[in-house]
Amino acid sequence: MRYLTLAEYDDVLLASLRNLGLSDADAKRLIEARWPMDQTGVIAEAGGRGLLVDAADVAAFAVEAIGDDAGGAVDNVVMAAESVEIFLQWAVENDRARLTPTGRLLQLGCTDRVINRTCRRAAAANN
């Protein structure tokens, strides 16, 4: 199942923020400020990358990663970028992730060229 990687999503976010008039430095600072993120942020991040997951998916991953000793703490999980990458891969491998409409487009393969072209165009406009 194809979804946007962290690097690809960051490129899309950077291109979008450039289009809004932010400088590269300000845009990159804003993009990095989203980490670490809580459960709600992880669900939103997955959606932006083309995957649908829910709180039960994040909790199941946290229990698997932390162990059963976590108790109710899984509701308060906070993840760094690397952990979210591992979570998304886990969600796909364990059939917990579903595709958003954008995610379904990513399965066609042609969208990779569109994403790259859009990001290059936005980068060129600001250099």
Image (cartoon, rainbow, N blue to C red):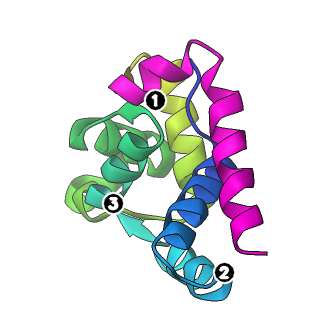
Q: Secondary structure at mark 2?
A: helix
Q: CA distance from mark 3 to mark 1?
A: 16 Å
Which circle, 3 or 2, is nearer the viewer? 2
Q: Position of residue 119 (x, y in %)?
A: 67, 52
User: Which is nearer the eye, 72 or 127?
Assistant: 127
Q: Are marks 3 and 1 in contact (CB under 8 Å)?
A: no
**Is residue 102 highlighted in magenta?**
yes
Count up the numbered dots. 3
Q: Position of residue 49 (x, y in %)?
A: 48, 41
Label 2 environment density (alpha carbons within 10 Å; few <14, some 14–19, many ≥20): some
Which is the main secondary structure of the residues drawn in magenta?
helix
Locate residue 77 relative to residue 115 in the image: left or right: left
Mark 3 or mark 2, which has the lower sequence index? 2
Instruction: Check the image and report above or below for 48 versus 30.
Output: above
Mark 2 or mark 1, which has the lower sequence index? 2
Q: CA distance from mark 3 to mark 2?
A: 23 Å
* Residue extent of the magenta highlight: 101-127
Q: Secondary structure at mark 3?
A: helix
Instruction: Check the image and report above or below for 87 versus 92.
Output: below
Give residue 41's mark. Answer: 3
Q: Position of residue 103 (x, y in %)?
A: 45, 26
User: Which is nearer the eye, 97 or 47?
Assistant: 47
Q: Which residue is mark 1?
A: 91
Q: Which residue is mark 2?
A: 24
User: Which is nearer the eye, 113 or 59?
Assistant: 113
Q: Are marks 2 and 1 in contact (CB under 8 Å)?
A: no
